[in-house]
Image: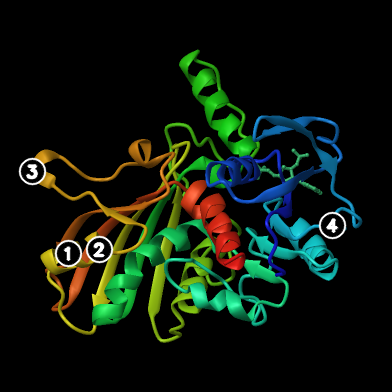
Amino acid sequence: MKKKSAYHVAVVGATGAVGTQMIETLEERKFPVDRLIPLASARSAGGTVSFNGQDLTIEALTKESFAGVDLALFSAGTDVSREYAPIAAKAGAVVIDNSAAWRMDKDVPLVVPEVNPADIKWHKGIIANPNCSTIQMVVALKPLHDQVRIKRIVVTTFQSVSGTGKEAMDELLDECKALLSFTEPTPKVYPYQIAFNCLPHIDEFLASGYTKEEMKMVNETRKILGDASIQVTATTVRVPVYVGHSEAVNIETERKLTANEARAILSDAPGVLVYDDPAHKLYPMPLDVAGKDEVYVGRIREDESIPNGLNLWVVADNLRKGAATNAVQIAELLIG
Ligand code: A2P
């Protein structure tokens, strides 16, 4: 991307859970924006979003939206990205795409700045932001992988409703209100009531019995870590939490790492905060981590069932590090 003192930045999906956070994050991190172009569907056109103290008018996304745009942050879902990301790239913008549309494309780097920043160099107009659950897991695991090589990962996620989007956040609140006034909720976004419940079902089921979300964690982890030999198996679960994904992660490593050694490595790792003091009931929880950019790690224990294994509890804000912050960090790398 041509170096400038400030850039024209389009945010596609500017009214959504992630898009709103992207605009906030650009402002918070003082990204050099000359002009911000908020784009959404025709339903939202004419409304406004606030950026750096100004009310900006939301425009309906069209094929012409990207003229003069340097950088386009996409968060309007896979279908929109599949259709419009190539149009934006062709118009000269560098796309940072938060959807699953391009992540596994061999011409598209999949980047977590703390893990594989050099991969942005080979982009051809589109850079993919990984799945939220994958991002927080690889930020925590890369420093351990570098020391003792991870052979196998077994992960179970506890994912908040904001990962599904704004309508799902409204659905959780509406269901809570309904249940507390003794009326039957009517789920629309999820197949079942999410309030006071857990759904072991995120994204579509595949013939194998796994969900697409689970396979994202398998395939994206290998691509980001640049190691196709790592074995990964995942169970992804939606829980009635607004913001913040939690993960129980078990790893088997080539060489032994004690819990204390892991704690020391992670304490020095970029983007990681170790919150691990069971004696004082200190462990990360989504309520504490919401609004933060770091990946929090606690409950670090040696897996006593195998010679070289560790258990960790990994929590991060899925809208920030799992989406908007990671995207803006990629943009920061791009402008050098
Ligand atoms: P809109 O508010 O106009 O529907 P979330 O992930 O929170 O559900 O948000 C999805 C975002 O993607 C919203 O900003 C939404 O805009 C936007 N969006 C959905 N469909 C389209 C579309 N066909 N074209 C442009 N933006 C879209």
Comes first in the chain, label 3 or label 2: 2
Comes first in the chain, label 4 or label 3: 4
Point out the residue furthest to the top here. 181
Whether residue 209 is visible, yes or no, is no
Structural crowding at the residue carrying mark 4, measured as other residues with C-alpha within 10 Å and reported as few (<14), some (14–19) or many (≥20): many
Q: Is residue 121 left or right of residue 144?
A: right
* x and y, in percent, of residue 316 in the image: 40, 49
Comes first in the chain, label 4 or label 1: 4
The residue at which mark 3 appears reads as: 279
Q: Is residue 49 left or right of residue 41?
A: left
Structural crowding at the residue carrying mark 1, measured as other residues with C-alpha within 10 Å and reported as few (<14), some (14–19) or many (≥20): few
Point out the residue furthest to the front here. 5
The residue at which mark 1 appears reads as: 264
Looking at this view, is 200 or 37 the one in front?
37
- Does the CB distance between marks 1 and 2 fall below 8 Å? yes
Rendered-image quadrant of the N terminus = bottom right
- Does the CB distance between marks 4 and 1 fall below 8 Å? no
Colour setup of the view: rainbow
Is the CB atom of the residue marked by disc 4 within 8 angstroms of ligand 1's nearest atom?
A: no
Looking at this view, is 237 or 21 the one in front?
21
Rendered-image quadrant of the C terminus = bottom right
- SS of the residue at dot 3? helix
Amino acid marked by disc 2? Asp
Amino acid marked by disc 4? Phe
The residue at which mark 4 appears reads as: 66
Q: Which tag is nearer the camera, tag 1 or tag 2?
A: 2
